[in-house]
Each structure stands twice: as C-alpha cells, then as structure tokens.
Amino acid sequence: MLAFERELQREEKSKATIEKYLRDAKAFFAFVGKQVISKELVIAFKQHLVEAQYAVSSINSMLASINSLLEFLELPECKAKNLRLQKQTYCAEDKELTKEEYLRLLEAAKDQPQLMLVMETICSTGIRVSELKYFTVEAVRRGEITISCKNKTRNIIVPGKLKKILLDYAAKEKIKAGSIFITKGGKPLDRSNIWAQMKRLCEKARVKKSKVFPHNLRKLFARTFYGIEKDIAKLADILGHSSVNTTRIYIMSTGKEHRRKIERLGLVV
C-alpha cells in the first residue's frame, strides 16, 4: 500500500485524492482477502457495492480508485467499467443549501469567528476547503489568491469586504504572515475539523445536517454566480473544473424548482 501511495504522490495527486484512493484500495483488499485478483473478482466487488446500495456516483468513484490500483499492480486487464448513470435534471431538496440557510449558519457561528470566516471565505470565492491554505496575509493584501491544485493554477479575486474582514482577523490573532486559517498550534486547518464544527451549528441555525458541509458552500457560490452571470465557462474556470459537465452539476436546481418550471409550461389543457 505504501508503494501505491508513493506512486499517487509521484502523479501529483492532491492529498485528499490520495487519502480517498487509499481508503478505497483498503476496502477492495478487505473484500478480496487471500484470493488472487481477477477480472471476475473486481466485477464481484462492483456487484457487492451495488447490493450494499451505494449511490451510483459513489460506486463509480470507488472504481476509479480501484482501476488506478490495478494499473499500478500491472493488472489493467482486470479493470471494471463504470456503472451507467443517466444525467440528472435536478437535485434533491434535502441536500441543497439555500442562501437563507447559509445566513442562519453564519449567525449561529458569530461566537466562533474563525469558523464564521471560513464559511464566508469558501462561499464568497467558491474555493475548495483544501484551498484555504492559500489565503495568506500577503495574498489577501494583494486582493488576489493564486491557487495551485491538480496540476492547474488559477487566480481568485478576494471581494473587498472579505479582504478587510480577513486582514482585521489576522491582525487580531497576531498573524503577520503566512496562512490565515491555522490551528492554535500554527498548522493549517483540517477539513474534518471544519466539517465537524459546521455540523454542530445545525440545530441552532435550524438547518438539516444533510445540507451542512464545506462543499455545499462552494455549490452555493456556483449557483449564485451563475444566477447573475449565466456564464458557465467562466464559472468553470473560477471553480477550477476541467469540464463544464462538472460545473453543470453544481448549478443544478432542486426538484421543487424544476417542478415549478414544468408547471409553468402550461401544456396540460
């Protein structure tokens, strides 16, 4: 497993991606046990995931990890095909965070200035939670953040109001240089800690836990930006997506909104 991890690092995979690939590989090896890896066994693993009622997208994501492992093990003939997934035209309402709910989360986090600022930073710029480390005092002063992720570099504009709040926070915390979002020990914030802290706001903010996680703030940014600009290509660049097909998922409306649009067609007499 260590050799596979080193190969992923050599391929310059992100830390989060490496962790996921290793987690999926461990699940696969637990299923395989002492059996010799074969195409039939990989297909059986895929069927096992289906029977365990994993979401199709989750199964395909795990297969991507396993297929990468099989390439590393020089067993490309054992790779399995993804499950076919019909494109959704709308998303589930119990998973979409609204702007009103986001504002209630901020209100609930007023006594936790760092967490409140983390949420505002992600939601107002569309960054990934793993990209918070690029928000250094120096970069925020310039008003532009340079992010290097997945072999791509992009620049993010810091809104004027956010810039002032970030610099005021840094001054108050005596952070004169380097990353603004750090632990008491001076290390970059961990995504799992942010996730857990956000979940604890749910009851006070009156927001379902299924809607509260860092990535949903990024999606709220995407929907809000697209609602104003209607420029999916530009949005894809801002989010750091290689394909606009990924961006389309981010701006998908809810089933309720989709139903309202269908009803407005007036095609039933």
Image: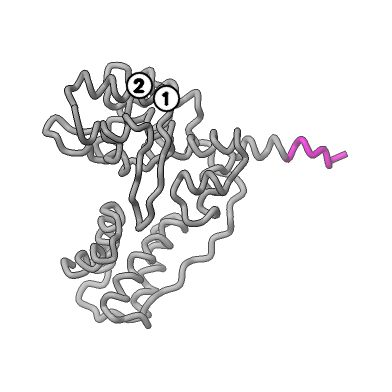
Q: Nearer the viewer, residue 139 or 211?
A: 139
**Magenta includes 263?**
yes
**Magenta includes 64?**
no
User: Looking at the picture, how far across and down is residue 20, in whole percent?
Assistant: 29, 56
Residue denoted by label 2 = 164
Q: Amino acid at mark 1?
A: Gly
Q: Secondary structure at mark 1?
A: helix
Identify the residue at image location x=25%, y=81%: 36
Asked if marks 2 and 1 touch (Cβ < 8 Å), the reply is yes
Q: Residues within 10 Å of mark 1 (few under 14, many from 20)?
A: few
124 is higher (above) or lower (below) than 109: below
Q: Is residue 19 left or right of residue 224?
A: left
Region rendered in magenta:
262-269
Q: How many dots with numbers?
A: 2
Identify the residue at image location x=46%, y=52%: 241
Q: Nearer the viewer, residue 204 or 16?
A: 16
Identify the residue at image location x=24%, y=24%: 170
User: Looking at the picture, how far across and down is residue 225, in whole percent?
Assistant: 54, 35
Q: Amino acid at mark 2?
A: Lys
User: Looking at the picture, how far across and down is residue 66, in whole percent?
Assistant: 33, 68
- Which label belongs to residue 160? 1
Outermost left residue:
185
267 is higher (above) or lower (below) than 137: below
Identify the residue at image location x=58%, y=59%: 86
Quadrant of residue 176 within the rendered picture:
top left
Q: Is residue 265 left or right of residue 60?
A: right
Magenta highlight: main SS: loop
Colour mapping = one colour
Q: Nearer the viewer, residue 7 or 92?
A: 7
